[in-house]
């Protein structure tokens, strides 16, 4: 029996203006949820409700808010298998990965529950006597958070958990095709005792969300926009926020490079390339885009990589597989377009290309009713190719070669993204030179481009984002604003820069 879900604003079900059907991408005949969609007006109303609720929530002492985060972590942990099963059912993520994704929420809660007892401000010395200076972290107000469905629960938790901990209210708009997973997570969050209106969930289409956000920003009910999704939409969201003098927290696409040096452990590099290129069917923002392999080991690497891919299991995500289907029909359609970027100078090193069907099977797997695609390794990609320059969300990895490390770094930076990156080398000098030269926000050494831990700064530069960082203590700057306070208890007006004591130095002094 499929679920019926609707937006919840201020603890109440919100009006429905349209419908969406979330399907199981492994068996597209199966309905996971029927989703009632809200319109732009409801989105803006949710932001007004959040604004009302935020005032009281900000007055709850931060350590008490930290206890609420602790409860959320416990609730998620106790429901981990159920939530992971639902994620697998709704977006086709292999169960082991889905369980890892749920773990990431718990890790995030573990980190922030203690932050409730820190949220440190500073005491700062004044330039004048009998005066004290302080800094405080203030909540920003309301965060409107729009998230993608490839990480339908972990990535939203990177916004929701710190935003709530810091004393903000949230209006969360998850991806429609991952609505049931999002709604389940919302239920777990609200079961922690969060007051109504502090966390609201709005299901809406992209255009309605954008219009609703514009209305809300105009009404002054949103102080922070968080967006995870494509660079194209991120640009529009960033522009809209900028018009309202706000800097959005943007987590966008990537064309994540992996450089393989001649001194690399090739088997390790193959393992890393296989997981980061084809795990999650290549649908992480941190997924591997292009392998940039030294010319002396190029042929050997491509052969081993293709062999490893051939041996990998693709199939029912409930089982022990490297990858399941694509997330949703929309992603399958887009992926088919990426495949048209293949050109005669490219060499497909992996076998069949396109949708896995009875006529185009992968071994004895015919894909059934699922959105399964052959994973593709494309050798010979060149710097001018779309396959080299643009994100190709899906199971396709390009390979190109280089002669010097400087050339490899230049190639790695060329597409203009800057999310994640990786180098395989046994030489520390190479690793540090790469780190210095790469434009990415995240660098792996002898590790896959994906799989960041939940308490390091996560985010990108260039087309991957506007420099905002999520996770760990760094995200606090997204969800709080610094306030400085000075308190003069001298009983007179002491003017800064003017009434400051001076100690005269003898600047002509020289050592004999
Ligand atoms: C994403 O695809 O939006 O680092 C996030 C990783 C995961 C998060 C990916 N922890 O691959």
Image (cartoon, helix red, strand yellow):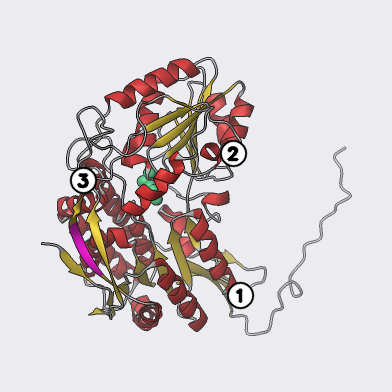
Mark 3, secondary structure of its residue: loop
User: Could you tell me if residue 461 is visible in this image?
Assistant: no
Front-most of residues 122 and 31: 31
Q: Which of the labelled discs sits on residue 369, or is there none?
A: 3
91 vs 412, left or right, is left
Front-most of residues 201 and 54: 201
Mark 2 vs mark 3: give the one in front: 3
Alpha carbon separation for disc pair 2 and 3: 39 Å
- Estimate the x, y position of residue 399 in percent, counting from the top left: 49, 28
Circles 2 and 1 in contact, beta carbons < 8 Å = no
- Residue position for label 1: 130
Alpha carbon separation for disc pair 1 and 3: 75 Å
Mark 2 and mark 3 lie on one chain; the one further toward the N terminus is: 3
Q: Residue at x 60, y 39 (%)?
A: 414
Figure quadrant of the N terminus: bottom left
Front-most of residues 217 and 400: 400
- Give the answer, above or below, for where 233 lies relative to 243: above
Q: Residue at x 34, y 81 (%)?
A: 53
- Label 3 Cα crowd, 10 Å radius (few <14 / some 14-19 / many 20+): some
Q: Residue furthest front?
A: 359
- Label 2 Cα crowd, 10 Å radius (few <14 / some 14-19 / many 20+): many
Figure quadrant of the C terminus: top right
Mark 1, secondary structure of its residue: loop
- Estimate the x, y position of residue 15 in percent, counting from the top left: 28, 81
Mark 1 vs mark 3: give the one in front: 3
Mark 1 and mark 3 lie on one chain; the one further toward the N terminus is: 1
Q: Residue at x 24, y 31 (%)?
A: 313
73 vs 346, left or right, is left
Please provide the residue range marked out in magenta. Answer: 31-35
- Estimate the x, y position of residue 345 in percent, counting from the top left: 54, 27
- Residue position for label 2: 413
Res 167 → quadrant: bottom left
């Amino acid at each position: 029996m499929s679920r019926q879900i609707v937006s919840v604003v201020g603890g109440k079900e919100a009006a429905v203006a349209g419908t969406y059907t979330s399907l199981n991408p492994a068996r597209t005949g199966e309905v996971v949820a029927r989703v009632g969609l809200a319109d732009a007006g409801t989105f803006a109303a949710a932001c007004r409700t959040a604004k009302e609720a935020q005032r009281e929530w900000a007055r709850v002492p931060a350590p008490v808010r930290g206890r609420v985060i602790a409860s959320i972590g416990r609730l998620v942990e106790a429901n981990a298998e159920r939530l992971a099963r639902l994620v697998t059912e709704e977006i086709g993520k292999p169960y082991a990965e889905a369980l890892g994704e749920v773990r990431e929420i718990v890790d995030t809660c573990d980190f922030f529950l203690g932050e409730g007892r820190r949220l440190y401000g500073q005491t700062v010395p004044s330039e004048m006597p009998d005066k004290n200076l302080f800094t405080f972290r203030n909540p920003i107000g309301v965060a409107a958070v729009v998230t993608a469905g490839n990480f339908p629960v972990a990535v939203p938790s990177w916004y929701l958990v710190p935003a709530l901990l810091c004393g903000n209210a949230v209006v969360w708009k998850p991806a429609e095709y991952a609505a049931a997973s999002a709604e389940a997570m919302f239920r777990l969050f609200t079961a922690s005792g969060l007051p109504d209106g502090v966390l609201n969930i709005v299901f809406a289409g992209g255009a309605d969300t954008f219009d609703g956000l514009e209305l809300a920003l105009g009404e002054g009910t949103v102080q922070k926009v968080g967006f995870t999704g494509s660079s194209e939409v991120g640009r529009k969201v960033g522009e809209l926020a900028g018009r309202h003098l706000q800097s959005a927290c943007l987590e966008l696409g990537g064309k994540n490079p992996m450089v393989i040096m001649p001194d690399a452990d090739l088997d390790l590099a193959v393992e890393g390339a296989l997981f980061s290129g084809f795990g999650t069917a290549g649908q992480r923002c941190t997924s591997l885009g292009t392998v940039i392999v030294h010319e002396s080991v190029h042929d050997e690497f491509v052969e081993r990589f293709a062999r490893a891919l051939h041996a990998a299991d693709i199939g029912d995500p409930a089982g022990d597989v490297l990858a399941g289907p694509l997330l949703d029909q929309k992603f399958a359609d887009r992926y088919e377009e990426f495949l048209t970027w293949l050109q005669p100078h490219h060499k497909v090193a992996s076998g069949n290309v396109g949708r896995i069907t009875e006529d185009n099977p992968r071994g004895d797997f015919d894909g059934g009713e699922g959105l399964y695609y052959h994973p593709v390794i494309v050798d010979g990609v060149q710097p001018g190719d779309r396959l080299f320059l643009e994100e190709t969300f899906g199971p396709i990895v390009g390979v190109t070669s280089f002669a010097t490390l400087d050339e490899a770094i230049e190639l790695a930076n060329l597409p203009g993204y800057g999310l994640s990156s990786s180098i395989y080398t046994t030489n520390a000098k190479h690793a540090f030179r790469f780190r210095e030269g790469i434009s990415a926000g995240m660098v792996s050494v002898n590790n896959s481009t994906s799989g960041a831990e939940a308490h390091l700064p996560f985010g990108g530069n260039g087309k991957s984002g506007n420099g905002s960082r999520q996770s760990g203590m760094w995200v606090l700057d997204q969800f709080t604003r610094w306030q400085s306070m000075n308190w003069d208890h001298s009983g007179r007006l002491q003017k800064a820069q003017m009434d400051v004591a001076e100690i005269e130095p003898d600047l002509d002094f020289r050592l004999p």
